[in-house]
Structure formats: C-alpha cells, structure tokens
Amino acid sequence: MNKPITLYDLVGTDDRRMSPFCWRAKLALAHKGLDFETIPLKFTEKNKLAFSGQEQVPVLVDGDQTVFDSWTIACYLEDKHPGAPSLFSNTSTRALTRIFNHWFDKLVTLKLFPLVVPDNFDVVCPEDLQYYTESRFKWLGKTRDELAAERSEDDFVEWRLSMDPLREQLQEQDFLGGESPLFADYIVFSMFMWARAVSPWPLILPEDVLYPWRERMLDLHDGLARKSKGYDY
Amino acid sequence: MNKPITLYDLVGTDDRRMSPFCWRAKLALAHKGLDFETIPLKFTEKNKLAFSGQEQVPVLVDGDQTVFDSWTIACYLEDKHPGAPSLFSNTSTRALTRIFNHWFDKLVTLKLFPLVVPDNFDVVCPEDLQYYTESRFKWLGKTRDELAAERSEDDFVEWRLSMDPLREQLQEQDFLGGESPLFADYIVFSMFMWARAVSPWPLILPEDVLYPWRERMLDLHDGLARKSKGYDY
C-alpha cells in the first residue's frame, strides 16, 4: 500500500490552521481527489523541516518526492495527475493563474496583513509568541496593541474594494474558474481561510457578491475548509 | 458586400496611433482575421463620436452594432466569431484575463504614465495641446518640463520590475497564451505600442526576456504593429 501524501501545515492554538499558502496546497490536493495527512507545525518547529532544506511551509512529501512552495505544489500535482480534475484548465490559464497569484498577493493579501496580524498574535502558540513578535511587529514597526487600536471598519471597507475585479467575475459565474473552481479560486479563498482561522473581524459581509462564493468554497470537498477551526461570520 | 468594420483610433502628429486601448481593439480584430478600417481621431474631435454616446475611443462600428471599451470589444469579437482563433482560449481564461486587465493597468500601465506623458505631449496634434495639458498635467500636478526633468533611467529600471511576473512566464513560453498570443498578450503589448508611438526613451532593453516577446508581437498579423509610426529601439 502506498504511504499517504503528507503536508506540513502551520498551526496555532486550538488546532487553528492559519497559513494561506498551506490552504492552497491542501485545497489543491483535495481538488485532485488525493488522500493526504497534515502534520501540524508551529512557527518555531522549523527543525522538523530540516530534511527538506526548507524553513517554510507548505512542504509536501509524496513517497520519495519532497515539494515546497504552494505554486510549485499545485503544478506538481497537476502534472502528476493529469487525469484528475484540472487545477488550471489549460496551459494559458496556468500562465495567467501564476501572474494572478503574484498580483493578488501584492494587491489584496498583503494589504490585509496589518488588519489581521493583531488577532493572529492572539492565537499563535505560546512558544511562538516571541518569533511572531519579532518577525511581524518589528517589520510593521508597530506593536500588536497599536495595530489593534488603529484599525477600524473603514480600513476593511477600503480593503474590500481591492477585490472589485473579482466581484465583476463572481456576479456572473459561480467560481473564477467558471462552473467549478480552479486554483485561482483557491488562491483567493486561502486568504479568507487565514483570516477565518485567526480573526473574529467579519472580513466579508452577507450583501457582498463574494459572500455566496465563499460559502460555496467552504462547502467544497466535503466541507474540508468549513470543518477546520475558525470564526464564523 | 458587407461594409468593413471601422474603429475610431486616437491619433497624434505624423499619424502616430497612441492609444493602448485602441491597440487592444485593433490587435483583437487582426487576431480574429477581420478586415477593418481605422478612423483617426484627435482628442478634441469627440464630437465625431457623438453618434455612439461615447466620449472616448476605441469605438467600433460593425454594421448596425456600435461597441465601445476595449474589453467589451474583445468579448464582442470573441462571441461573434467563435470559429476564428480565440482571444481567450476558454471561459476560465476569459475570467482571469479580465482580472489581469485590471491589475496590469493598475500596477504597470498607470505607473508608466508620468514617465511617458512628457514625450506624449510633444506629439499630440497642435489643436489638442490645451486639452492634453489640462487633462494630464493638471492631474499629475506638474508641468511637462518638470516631469521631463525629474525622470531618469532609474525610474525606468524600477518601473521595469513591475513586469517581473510576466518575465517568469515569458522565459518559459513564447507568449502569455502559450505557443500563440491571446488577448492577455495584447493587453501588455498595447502599453508598449503607446510608448513606442510617443516616446524615444527605450522602454525595454535587448537583454530583457520581454524584448524578444515584444519583437514577436511587432511581427504578428503581417507586422500590423511594426508598420505603425513610432520610435525604434
């Protein structure tokens, strides 16, 4: 019998799975219909990844193969399992998805960072608090409490505008991929999964056209995402 | 005999065709193998578009149909001529291309604006100079000469970095679309055509992986782009 695929997956308190990049890999695995197990990993357990030469999750182990980086993992799965549902639809879509990946993270994910980081601090494991403080708050130049005090619903309203190009599509079709999801959907959704895992702040409101899309995404693959620990809104 | 398709096309001195959005429409028409004529239009000749209810080019007239906005024109041509080479490859790619269109213009085209506008001023038709000054320089808050004096090769070096996600693809394949171009290629290339029409500043250097791609784009459709008036570099 084949050993199942394993994925090293960033974890916070109460088994919160909070890495958007790990979510991209997990959803890609589920999309391909593959059995996999996750190995929860704290920020300060990088030593457990030493075998891979990596310091960051996701790291996927599939038999003799070790694959890292969410984009590379998606391409690896797509190329290894061409008969399973495609993550990209075709070569042109793969190319555009890769560029979409860059620009989505730059224009949307990164801008969410200061809004969600204070709550994220509250759910990192106790042994990770020092690491998280040094890597996040020093970089942002503000403390957890300063960031938490500064943010307001207005910031979220403004941030939500960054997703307008997505809304244009998702009011016309169920998924960015059309009738069914593609990796582009997982790229966007993974950011929502990060926020859901760590922050009670409603990232998205019921009247938003993205709301029913997010609900559909939560339900995919037997509710893989919905079953995970997080805040409901 | 059918009347040929006509496209209203922004023009400067020496028949310079300088609108990136008109280039998107022209290249989409050529991609579909359609005969078309362009009607050159100066900034201050908006009255000639009055029949369409529009104030901006591109405006396409195809028999009884009047279509405006480069994205809408591409979709119109794609849907009307499904048997001709596709501009999008499939529905998923169309959705991603639309988002790509937004983000490319935001992250790349718009950032080129202050670098190219001083040269653009020099090639707008004499009767357009006042309009151009009021619409561009007042918006940017600087005069033509201030913008020209401030810019340096360093600005272009930095601006070129904004296209790194495209380079990642174009070092692996001939076009963003794969083996042949798609509308995503025309979106990017149209910006180069705008700059080529108006500015002698070399936007792209021969050692850049985008350089041979741009050369291929210039040659497409019997050299449609290369034959147009512009600066060689």
Image: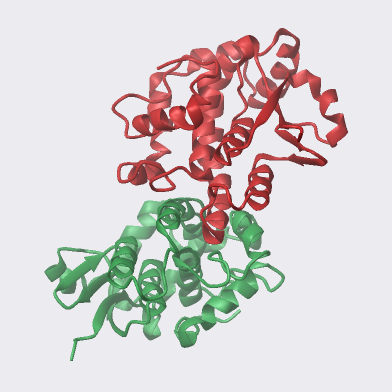
Chain colours: A red, B green
At horizontal 65% and vertical 15% (from top left) the residue drawn is: A12
Image quarter for residue A122? top right
Image quarter for residue B190? bottom left
At horizontal 67% and vertical 23% (from top left) the residue drawn is: A136
Name the quadrant of the N terminus of chain B.
bottom left
Residue A213 appears in the rendering: yes
At horizontal 64% and vertical 10% (from top left) the residue drawn is: A13
At horizontal 61% and vertical 59% (from top left) the residue drawn is: B160
Residue B126 in the image: above or below residue A211: below
Q: Farthest bottom residue?
A: B1
Image quarter for residue A2? top right
Position of B203 compared to B78: left or right? right
Position of A8 compared to A210: left or right? right
Residue B65 at x, y percent in the picture: 17, 71
Q: Nearer the viewer, residue B37 or A86?
A: A86
Q: Nearer the viewer, residue A58 or A2?
A: A2
Residue B207 at x, y percent in the picture: 72, 70
Residue A48 at x, y percent in the picture: 83, 24
Residue A178 in the image: above or below residue B1: above
Position of B35 compared to A145: left or right? left
